[in-house]
Structure formats: C-alpha cells, structure tokens
Amino acid sequence: MVLAIILVVLVIITVVFTFVSPWWFTPLASNWGTIDDALIITFVITGIVFVAVTLFMALAIFKFHHKPGRRATFEPENKKLEWWLTGLTTVGIIAMLAPGLVVWAQYINPPAEARAFEAVGQQWSWNFRLPGQDGELGQAATRFVSGDNPLGLDPQDPLGRDDIIIEGDDMHILLDQPVIVYLRSLDVLHDFYVPQFRAKMDLVPGMVTYFWFTPIRTGEFEILCAELCGVGHSQMRGIVIVEEAAAYQLWLADQLTFAEMMAEQEGDKND
C-alpha cells in the first residue's frame, strides 16, 4: 500500500514539475522550430506512457496485494493483451519517429540560396573559413596542416586562394540568410552545437559533414563541442555573431584571405 501511494505521488510530482520547471529550451534563434515540435511530441508520448505504466503498477499493487487466503492465478499467455500492447507500441514509435524523419529530410537539404562557411574543429578550438569572391571553398586536407597553414588548405588549388580564414576569432553571419555549415575535424571526433540554433552535427575525421539553418535574430551565440573529445573538451567553445548586413560587411572587409595570410607569413619569415 505504501509503495502504491509513493508511485502515485511520484507521478503527480513529475507532471507538476514538467509544467512549472524553470528549465526549458533556450529561446529559439533559427528557423528550426520544427525540431522543438518533434522533441515536444516525444516528451508527450513518453510522458503519457510513464504516467500510464506507473499508475498501472500502483493500481496492481493496491488491488492485488497479498491477503491471507488469496492465491495468484498463473496465466502464461494472453493473445488479446499482447496484440493491444504490440499495436499501441507500434503507434507510439511511429508517432515519435515520423516527425523526426520529416525534419531530418529538411535538415540535410539546404535551399539553393544558402551561403556556405566551414567550421574546423581541433583539440580544443574552433576555426572558420568563408568562400571568397568566387563563391567556392578550395580543397583542404589534414596533410596540408602546418603552422603556416592551420586549416590545411591545398596551396595548389586556385579556388582556395581567396578563401577567408578566421583563426582563433568569432564567426559572423548574416541575419535571415540561410547558411550551410560544412564541418571538418583535424584530429578526433567533435560536434558543432549552438543550442539557440537547435543545430548540431558531428565532425568526423576524414569526412566533411554538413547541416543548414537560417538565423532569425541578432546576437552572440556560443558554440559548444557536444562530443567528448579529450581533457580540454569543456573549454572547446566559440562564438557565432548574427548581425545586419552593414555590420557584417564591415567585419568581412577586415578579414584576411588565404593568399594574404600566406604572403604575410612569408614576409615575416624574410624579415
């Protein structure tokens, strides 16, 4: 009896805390409100199952607790109950998976007008690259990484000469402009995550992964690494700044291209 009461109280506390909890999603700053919707659907379905199963256990404990002279009936099979449980479970799983699959299909299909930038993860920092005037990112590979070429751009690829290198600094993007983010790791598995954008994706060594989003409000947003990547994992942070076109163009004009960076480093060596 005491256990049944405890279970009912647990359900009541859980439901109340769900609605009055001070912890919820961070304010949305991208177009991915559908990701929130998919998560809420999952919360609702799993919450209903939790309440139903826990209350059923409390009812069973209350109704079928031991009494002198009462004997349990052994019933190894119940086809009707099995079909009901199988059907309800199937419906619940489909209801949780279907919205996520729809959102995922959108998540990996950027619009044609999306601009690109690359985020490069390395223990334990973020660096970035933007296409130059030609609008294309040049080739890059880990074998080209050096002190003079931290992102590993191919020095022989003409498409990369005008690429804009953002090393050890904040990344700026335009408000209301769709952006596709290409992700590359120079060492181990990392994960690019900005909670307000609801956007995250693994950086897998030897691969280029990607996702896209549209920032819908200005501000500074922290980049986190959401994959344990070593002893400095918690310090692997960066900043994305979303701003209007005028401020973005002023920032962009101050950045160095790969060719300018190489020329500057060559001049330092000669000095």
Image: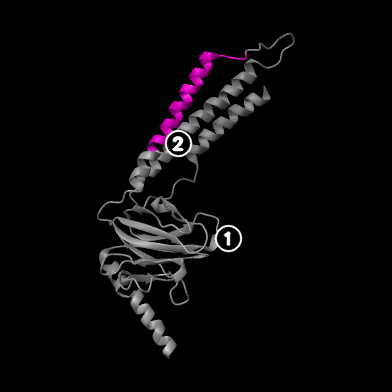
Q: Earlier in the sequence, mark 1 or mark 2?
A: 2
Q: How many marks?
A: 2
**Tag in front: 1 or 2:** 1
Instruction: Tell me the residue at 50%/38% (across/down).
Output: 18
Magenta-colored stretch includes residue 91? yes
User: Quadrant where the C terminus lies?
Assistant: bottom left
> In the image, 96: left or right of 60?
left
Q: Position of residue 191 (x, y in %)?
A: 47, 55
The part of the chain drawn in magenta is: 76-99
Q: Amino acid at mark 1?
A: Gly
Instruction: Tell me the residue at 30%/67% (across/down).
Output: 248
Query: Helix, strand or loop at disc 1?
Result: loop
Tell which residue pokes out farthest to the bottom in this image: 271
For label 2, the crowd category at 10 Å Cα-Cα, with few meaning under 14, some 14 to 19 and many 20 or more, is some
Q: Position of residue 147 (x, y in %)?
A: 47, 76
Q: Amino acid at mark 2?
A: Thr
Q: Mark number for residue 42?
A: 2
Q: Main secondary structure of the magenta part?
A: helix
Q: Nearer the viewer, residue 133 or 54?
A: 133
Q: Nearer the viewer, residue 71 or 263?
A: 263
Tell which residue pokes out farthest to the top in this image: 69
Q: Which residue is tagged 1? A: 230
Query: Image quarter for residue 234?
Result: bottom right
Q: Eyeballing the image, is 76 above or below 42?
A: above
Q: Indicate the colouring scheme.
A: one colour
CA gap between label 1 and label 2 equals: 31 Å
Q: Mark number for residue 141?
A: none
